[in-house]
Image (spheres, rainbow, N blue to C red):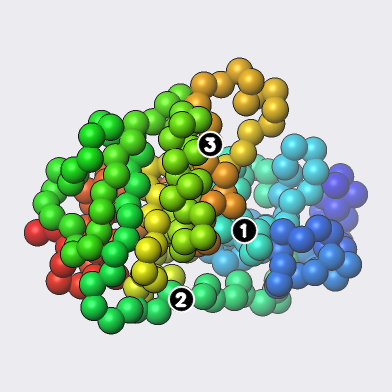
């Protein structure tokens, strides 16, 4: 990695090989990209940047830029990299890399669609969140959070609900906005909101209370609102309903 840094300083560009699968299908392992120096004020969303990450060289796409950090994700991932990349860790930018492929859209279905919406982080009793009614056929299930995520019992319940059914994970850490993906919901869709998705190293899992919801549970991940900005359950339901069941959302 230091050779890349010194090469950029000396020559103004460095060609490096791509490794791993995180940038599929845009970049494949063994392909080569050319890095150029990255000025913080010139980095833009959709740039592909190289950065320091736990002693290694990362190469991912930028999705949001802040004065002190950038939010990135590999094109093969549906959730942003945790944590955001400090601006000081950015090494270079790879020009002439194709854009990330557009996500697959879920088609609109005729008539009301039955869906189960699981709201994590509220009281255990079911009912509409503050804010009004929900679309015809939507069933709300409230479950409490526990520690960093949910209890083992709630996790098992979510797994059972999602098994064999379409599942949408709603998270402020999702790469794609809901409007990019959802024009409708297939029948029997399970919508998970308020969950902390991901996995923990075994050592951390033994010391922290609660369980993260594995990313494999969802077929797609979407966000409602700007990247990494939490949206309340009432607002999220209202926005989701406006996308997939126009005219039936909360008043």
Label 1 SS = loop
Can residue 37 be seen here?
no
Packing grade of label 3 (10 A; few <14, some 14-19, many >=20) is: many
**110 on left or right of 25:** left
Say which of 202 and 236 sits in front.
Answer: 202
Can you tell which mark lies on residue 105?
Answer: 2
**120 on left or right of 17:** left
Can you tell which mark lies on residue 77?
Answer: 1
Quadrant hosting residue 23: bottom right
Say which of 149 and 141 sits in front.
Answer: 141
Q: Residue at x 40, y 50 (%)?
A: 192
Label 3 SS = loop
| Residue 210 pos. (x, y %) | 50, 26
Can you tell which mark lies on residue 212?
Answer: 3
Say which of 23 and 219 sits in front.
Answer: 219
3 and 2 marks in contact (CB < 8 Å) = no
For discs 1 and 2, the disc positioned in front in the rendered view = 2
Q: If the image is split into quadrants, where does the C terminus sit?
A: bottom left
3 and 1 marks in contact (CB < 8 Å) = no
Q: Residue at x 82, y 50 (%)?
A: 5
């Amino acid at each position: 990695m230091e050779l890349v840094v010194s090469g950029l300083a000396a020559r103004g560009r460095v060609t490096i090989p791509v490794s791993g699968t995180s940038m599929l299908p845009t970049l494949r392992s063994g392909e080569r990209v050319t890095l150029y120096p990255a000025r913080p004020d010139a980095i833009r969303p959709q740039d592909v940047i190289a950065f320091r990450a736990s002693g290694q060289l990362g190469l991912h796409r930028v999705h949001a830029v802040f004065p002190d950090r950038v939010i990135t994700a590999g094109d093969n991932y549906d959730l942003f990299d945790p944590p955001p990349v400090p601006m000081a860790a950015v090494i270079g930018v790879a020009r002439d890399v194709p854009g990330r492929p557009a996500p697959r859209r879920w088609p609109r279905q005729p008539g009301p669609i039955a869906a189960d919406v699981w709201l994590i982080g509220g009281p255990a009793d079911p009912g509409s969140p503050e804010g009004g009614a929900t679309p015809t056929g939507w069933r709300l299930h409230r479950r409490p959070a526990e520690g960093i995520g949910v209890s083992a019992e709630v996790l098992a319940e979510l797994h059972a609900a999602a098994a064999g059914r379409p599942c949408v994970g709603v998270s402020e850490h999702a790469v794609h906005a809901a409007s990019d993906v959802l024009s409708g919901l297939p029948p029997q869709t399970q919508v998970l909101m308020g969950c902390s998705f991901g996995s923990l190293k075994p050592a951390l899992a033994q010391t922290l209370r609660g369980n993260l919801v594995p990313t494999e549970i969802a077929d797609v991940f979407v966000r409602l609102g700007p990247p990494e900005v939490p949206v309340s359950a009432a607002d999220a339901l209202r926005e989701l309903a406006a996308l997939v069941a126009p005219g039936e959302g909360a008043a």
